[in-house]
Amino acid sequence: MLFPDYRPRRLRQNENFRRMIRETRLSVDDLILPIFAVEGKKVRNPISSMPGHCQMSVDNIVKETKEAVELGIPAVMLFGIPDKKDSLATSAYAKDGIVQKTVKAIKAEVPDLVVITDVCLCEYTDHGHCGMVQNGIIDNDATLDLLARTALSHTQAGADMVAPSDMMDGRVSEIRDSLDENGFETIPIMSYAAKYCSAFYYPFRQAAESAPQFGDRRTYQMDPANSTEAIREVTLDVEEGADIIMVKPAIPYLDIIYRVREEIDLPVAAYNVSGEFAMIKAADKLGWLDGNKVMMETLTAIKRAGADMILTYFAKEAAKELVGH
């Protein structure tokens, strides 16, 4: 088909034509809202690098989740910031931990909302790493039991899904075995399977108070230069029992999302991370771009690359655009 016999612009002439041939459709059903929980009452601590987001106490989180449901958002991802941290991350798996209390409160007030909990130790350790530290080295195998205990405690509190983000080898199978042995075989695991050691996480580390106190996370998070390794990581987690596979970050790794989507037949999630959010918000504030339009284009690109669901700090704003609020 060559010009002038074929004219692609014929089907771009008006909005109804464009709607009729649109290949990728972003929906509020695709969105997952991250939330940061802290101890206390009536707490809303603004996160300076993430405009519109706060660390919130349980009472305010319940209000936030009710608003999310009203907007049609089907799920939230819950992160916890404890009052006390130690080398064994004991607050991560405590029955009265901040995540456990928040899950119970959400499920009591907003039972139909899907509550996913981030399973990691970095927010709970005094050194800020995602695993146990032995002689200055992250001890992979010593970490697995604590991750499984954390996931189990979240599930016992009422979590609908657990999401290990630590990138320790073997953690999906350890968590799956623990859940199954305790009667939670129906609880799905969303694995942060291809999580890169990215500079785009900085605002999150401020929000979650989880920056490492020494070194960095390159010995467990992936090298940004690698693509085939991501497929190996994903394949391992699928074989260990993951139900949903996540790629993180999203925008700099659209090629990875696409490759994962082509390689596996499980649902694929992508995390539109804090740095991606912060850049758009900052440029919008400076008048350098239209924040709403870039937000929607960004989320559409992530969906087009192959993501079935998107964790994004834009969830509420995007939902309002999508449902016409």
Image (cartoon, rainbow, N blue to C red):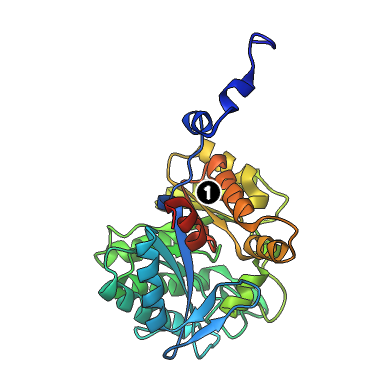
Left or right of 47? Residue 236 is: left
Residue 220 visible here:
no
Percent from the top left, x then y, of residue 52? 56, 72
Quarter of the rendering containing residue 198: bottom right
- Image position of 273 with respect to 24: above or below: below
Q: Secondary structure at mark 1?
A: helix
In the rendered image, the vertical position of residue 57 relative to residue 191, given as above or below: below
The x and y percentages for residue 6 are: 63, 13
Instruction: Please state, as top left, top right, bottom left or bottom right, where the N terminus lies in the image.
Output: top right
* Res 176 visible: yes
Residue at 59 percent across and 77 percent down: it is 207
Q: Position of residue 116 (x, y in %)?
A: 40, 65
Q: Dot 1, crowdedness within 10 Å: few (<14), some or many (≥20)?
A: many
**Residue lying at 68% horizontally and 79% vertically, measured from the top left:** 136
Amino acid type of the residue that numbered disc 1 sits on in the rendered structure: Val
- Quadrant of the image containing the C terminus: bottom left
The residue indicated by pointer 1 is 234
Q: Position of residue 285 (x, y in %)?
A: 70, 66
Looking at the image, the residue that sits furthest to the left is: 183
